[in-house]
Image: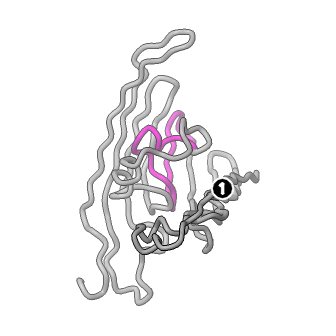
Amino acid sequence: AIGAQVQFDLGTYAQSTPDGIDNRMPVGARDLGSGVNLRRGCIFLVGAFGDWTVNLAPEFGGSPDGAPTLYAANLDYTGIKPLTVTLGYFNPWLTLQDSMSSNDYLLMEQSSIVPIAVNLAGGSARAALGMRVATDDYCVAGYLTGGTYGAQGGGLLNDQQTGATTRIALRLLRGEDWNLHAGASASMVFQPNQNGRNC
């Protein structure tokens, strides 16, 4: 299967600056940045054979856009229902927003605290091994994590990060048009990423 997610931003500012006050304005407000940005430009390539699935997702977007990178490259095993075992570079489930597609966010982006908390031991293109058990009424997920894609230094001298993430979520009550959801998440870094000078 093949798919894509494209979110393209276009913005402009109607701004005029009277003569003589440029030097009193903050630098960032003197010329606001009109232009375009490919916020997300991800191509999804998926291959399945029996209980095995291979996912490859290069990412061409970002803020700012420019250099292509990797969103995910992983192998899933689903032979024991409802268990999914995953190995590779991917986004380990950690928070509610982190566990859903950006196509399903209520707002354009996650709240600021989500990437701050998630990126300690999780986040996109994180090397990880783990599993999740998910049904319509509960989800339990746990992963051992390493560094992010591209975190290793060019000289291969740095010790990469190791950590772990876990998430438990329950649908406690439900109705025809409502649900009561509760969840808890935790992460821990065992070994921070180090460069060659700190080894």
Residue 85 lies within the magenta run: yes
Give percent across and percent down for residue 31.
54, 69
Residue 151 visible to an observer of this rendering: yes
Most distant residue in the top direction: 176
Residue 88 seen in render: no
Work out whether residue 21 or residue 45 is closer to the camera in this orientation and state it: 21
In this rendering, position of residue 64 left or right of residue 195: right
Q: Where 109 sits versus 123, above or below?
A: above
24 and 175: which is toward the camera: 24
Q: Amino acid at mark 1?
A: Asp
> Image height check: is 46 above or below 83?
below
Helix, strand or loop status at disc 1: strand
Q: How is the image coloured?
A: one colour
Counting from the top left corner in percent of width and height, residue 100 is at 53, 41
Residue sitting at x 27%, y 68%: 192
Q: Nearer the viewer, residue 85 or 37?
A: 37
**Whole-percent x and y of residue 2?**
76, 53
Please name whichever residue, 12 or 157, is drawn nearer the observer in this view of the structure: 12
Query: Could you tell me how many numbered marks the image carries?
Result: 1
Residue wearing tag 1: 9
Residue at the image position 63 percent from the left and 45 percent from the top = 51
Looking at the rendering, which quadrant does residue 66 occupy? bottom right
Give, as a single range, the part of the protein colored magenta. Answer: 78-101
Q: Position of residue 8 (x, y in %)?
A: 68, 56
Q: Residues within 10 Å of mark 1 (few under 14, many from 20)?
A: few
**Quick check: 134 left or right of 45?**
left
Residue ranking furthest to the front: 19
Q: Residue at x 33, y 81 (%)?
A: 158
Quadrant for residue 71, please give it: bottom right
